[in-house]
């Protein structure tokens, strides 16, 4: 197991809210090596003692159950170096004393700093085998910038020691999608165009852009969420069964799905996609402000796009991908709608009003699985020929502790397990499709549709959302 973490971006939101608390929990659970060490690196001019003073209350807040002794046990292993990541020499200087240990460098920084930081790491010896590198999403902002980063990094470290994160892959309910698909004959038997009518993948957030304006105004929802999390979910739903659970066998199948995505063109942009931006509204009864990026920013906070996978399994099955900020409810789900039965025998409802079978994987905030069936309860009030929709619900037991994504992913990198990380060819293929969407938007001059915070997106979004979601009582936000 690797025993040293070089954490770049240590003063950033991700590190403070998720990465250090994850390390604290792993340490408390005895899952880190005896002599584990962390070097925190960022631009701010702290020393180790002052960085500890900043981090201690953040850890107390993130993990109220941790004692001060637990927190000190982590801080004792952690030192801090101020470093200018644009300057490879200073990076090299800040890491070279630790490079002979078994290091993992974790870059939780903007992708524009990846190349200079990696050059510094290489100069300081921290990319030599067996050292490893972790990169946060996004890798670049389009195909060209991603290709430049991938190429520059490939000259400094072998692909089998690079771990590109998509934290959705570290979420237990997301991994469960694979378990359910490939562990059950019942599902795999119907998992194709013969039985499936459509698939919806929805990642709705009630949070806004808050505090990340600089990044978000250049990125927008398509690049921030669809390029990474939503396309990874799509891969897990649509990929062929891998021949084994070995990392590269899984990634081989995922990349085939990404390469089979039909590029969006300008002619179909208005039919197959919608983009929106939230205006003022109400969330949970509280007023919420409009998103106002700097003049000239085209950033959307809502995307609905229908993806078509051109292969034998999925020909003709639309995958409706939707994500947005400041929506009525925080919920992520995959909804698989099956085709209607071929010959309908019952009087009521008539065949046109029968509800098709629908399988819903709710991934967050609670994990559960619902199967919508048609059934006759044969009670006195219903005739035997009258069917009603019946929900079979499988709630995942709440007492079960499931590690948060970053705990799982950090452990996997320390142990060298690649299965939940994104390979370079996946990054390229995902950007190629995303570029087609943003080029089609430009060519068709697809307008940004306003929607009030707390609603389910612009009116045009209805066609992309899973049935009934925009009528959920929880989504009662709306007009300012
Ligand atoms: C991040 C995006 O990758 O994922 C954020 O940059 C988004 O914009 C976040 O809010 C959502 O993650 P989660 O785990 O809260 O669903």
Image (spheres, rainbow, N blue to C red):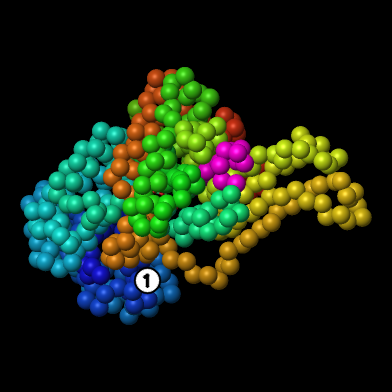
Q: Is residue 137 left or right of residue 358?
A: left
Q: How many labels sit on residues?
A: 1
Circle 1 is placed at which residue position? Answer: 25
Q: Position of residue 364 (x, y in %)?
A: 53, 55
- Determine the residue positioned at 46% across, 50% down: 241
Whether residue 441 appears in magenta in the rendering, the answer is no
Residue in view at x 23 percent, y 64 percent: 5
Q: In the orientation shown, which residue stands out farthest toward the bottom?
A: 69
Give SS at disc 1: helix
Is residue 427 visible in the rendered image? The answer is yes
| Above/below status of 196 relative to 418 | above
Locate the C terminus by quadrant: top right
Query: Horizontal and vertical percent for residue 47?
Result: 17, 65
Residue name at image x 61 percent, y 54 percent: 186
Residue 5 in the figure: left or right of residue 178: left
* Circle 1 Cα neighbour tier, 10 Å, few/some/many (<14 / 14–19 / ≥20): many
Q: Is residue 131 above or below residue 223?
A: below
Asked if the stretch drawn in magenta spans residue 194, the answer is yes
Question: What is the x, y in percent for residue 313?
Answer: 51, 39
Residue 219 shows in the view: no
**Which residue range is magenta in the image?**
190-205
Identify the image quadrant of the N terminus: bottom left
Q: For this rendering, which residue is in front, 365 or 422?
A: 422
Q: Nearer the viewer, residue 107 or 325?
A: 107
């Amino acid at each position: 197991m690797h025993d040293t973490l070089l954490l770049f971006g240590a003063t950033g939101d991700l590190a403070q809210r998720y990465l250090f608390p994850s390390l604290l929990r792993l340490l408390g659970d005895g899952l880190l090596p005896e002599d584990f060490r962390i070097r925190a690196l960022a631009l701010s001019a702290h020393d180790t003692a002052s960085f500890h003073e900043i981090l201690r209350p953040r850890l107390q807040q993130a993990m109220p159950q941790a004692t001060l002794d637990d927190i000190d046990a982590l801080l004792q292993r952690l030192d801090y170096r101020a470093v200018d990541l644009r300057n490879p020499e200073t990076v090299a200087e800040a890491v070279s004393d630790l490079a002979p240990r078994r290091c993992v460098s974790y870059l939780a920084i903007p992708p524009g700093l990846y190349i200079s930081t990696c050059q510094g790491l290489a100069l300081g010896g921290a990319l030599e085998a067996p050292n490893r590198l972790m990169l946060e999403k996004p890798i670049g902002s389009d195909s060209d910038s991603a290709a430049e980063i991938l190429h520059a990094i490939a000259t400094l470290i072998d692909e089998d020691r690079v771990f590109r994160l998509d934290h959705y892959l570290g979420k237990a309910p997301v991994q469960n999608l694979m378990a359910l698909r490939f562990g059950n004959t019942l599902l795999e038997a119907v998992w194709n165009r013969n039985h499936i009518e459509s698939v919806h993948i929805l990642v709705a957030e009630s949070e806004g852009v808050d505090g990340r304006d600089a990044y978000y105004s250049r990125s927008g929802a398509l690049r921030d969420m669809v390029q990474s999390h939503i396309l990874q979910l799509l891969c897990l739903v649509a990929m062929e069964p891998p021949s084994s659970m070995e990392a590269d066998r899984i990634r081989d199948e995922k990349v085939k799905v990404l390469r089979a995505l039909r590029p969006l063109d300008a002619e179909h942009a208005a039919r197959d996609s919608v983009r929106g931006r939230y205006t003022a509204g109400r969330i949970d009864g509280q007023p919420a402000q409009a998103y106002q990026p700097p003049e000239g920013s085209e950033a959307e906070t809502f995307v609905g796009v229908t993806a078509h996978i051109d292969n034998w399994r999925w020909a003709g099955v639309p995958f409706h991908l939707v994500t947005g900020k400041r929506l009525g409810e925080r919920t992520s789900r995959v909804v698989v709608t099956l085709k209607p039965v071929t010959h309908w025998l019952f009087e009521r409802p008539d065949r046109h009003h029968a509800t098709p079978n629908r399988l819903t994987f709710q991934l967050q905030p609670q994990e559960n699985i619902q199967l919508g069936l048609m059934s006759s309860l044969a009670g006195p009030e219903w005739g035997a020929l009258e069917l009603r929709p019946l929900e079979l619900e499988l709630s995942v037991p709440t007492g079960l502790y499931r590690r948060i994504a970053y705990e799982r992913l950090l452990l996997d990198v320390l142990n060298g397990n690649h299965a939940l990380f994104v390979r370079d060819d996946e990054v390229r293929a995902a950007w190629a499709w995303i570029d087609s969407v943003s080029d089609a938007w430009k060519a068709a001059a697809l307008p940004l549709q306003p929607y009030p915070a707390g609603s389910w997106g612009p009116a045009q979004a209805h066609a992309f959302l899973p049935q009934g979601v925009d009528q959920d009582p929880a989504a009662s936000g709306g007009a300012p």
